[in-house]
């Protein structure tokens, strides 16, 4: 095969980019809907703490509510005066060890957990 066989025409790239952008927008819409559900289930203080954890997680996506946590429990009992978040982290590093990805689970209520994926 010649190198010319691998060159994509400009309209093909535009179509691929548009599809990727549409998928990202749909995932963002789903993530916002899940966070809105969480906001209705917890106190404003706890929601603010969850938002803080999300902000510290790097690039986050794929929010969902699950029935059981995954990963290692994180003892956060000394971080907040009035409440600490029960949190589990399932984390992996990349080939060179300077990047991380995985999931974070935070307990919302008995048997319900907010999970999101992250990468740093």
Image (cartoon, rainbow, N blue to C red):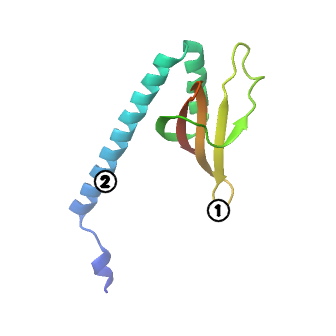
**Which of the pair 50/113 is nearer the observer?**
113
- Where residue 86 appears, as percent x and y from the top left, is 67, 28
- Where residue 12 appears, as percent x and y from the top left, is 24, 62
Reply above or below: 7 against 65: below
Residue 103 figure quarter: top right
Please give the label number shown on residue 17: 2
Please give the label number shown on residue 95: 1
Residue lying furthest bottom: 1
Reply above or below: 17 against 64: below
Between the residue at mark 1 and the residue at mark 2, the CA separation in whole angstroms equals: 28 Å
**Which of the pair 51/63 is nearer the observer?**
63
Q: Which residue is depicted at the point 66% across and 32% down?
A: 87
- Where residue 67 appears, as percent x and y from the top left, is 54, 34
- Where residue 41 appears, as percent x and y from the top left, is 50, 18
Q: Which quadrant would the N terminus be assigned to in this image?
A: bottom left
In-image side of 50 versus 19 (left or right): right
Q: Which residue is depicted at the point 69% across and 21% down?
A: 84
Which mark is in front, 1 or 2?
A: 1
Q: Is residue 5 visible?
A: yes
**Which of the pair 11/76 is nearer the observer?**
76
Reply above or below: 89 against 32: below
């Amino acid at each position: 095969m010649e190198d010319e066989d691998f060159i994509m025409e400009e309209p093909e790239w535009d179509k691929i980019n548009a599809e990727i952008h549409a998928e990202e927008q749909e995932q963002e819409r789903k993530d916002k809907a899940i966070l809105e559900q969480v906001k209705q289930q917890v106190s404003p203080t706890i929601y603010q703490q969850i938002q803080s954890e999300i902000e510290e997680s790097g690039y986050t996506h794929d929010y969902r509510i699950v029935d059981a946590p995954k990963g290692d429990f994180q003892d956060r009992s000394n971080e907040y005066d009035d409440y600490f978040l029960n949190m589990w982290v399932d984390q992996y590093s990349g080939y060179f060890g300077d990047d991380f990805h995985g999931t974070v689970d935070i307990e919302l209520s008995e048997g319900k957990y907010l999970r999101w994926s992250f990468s740093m």
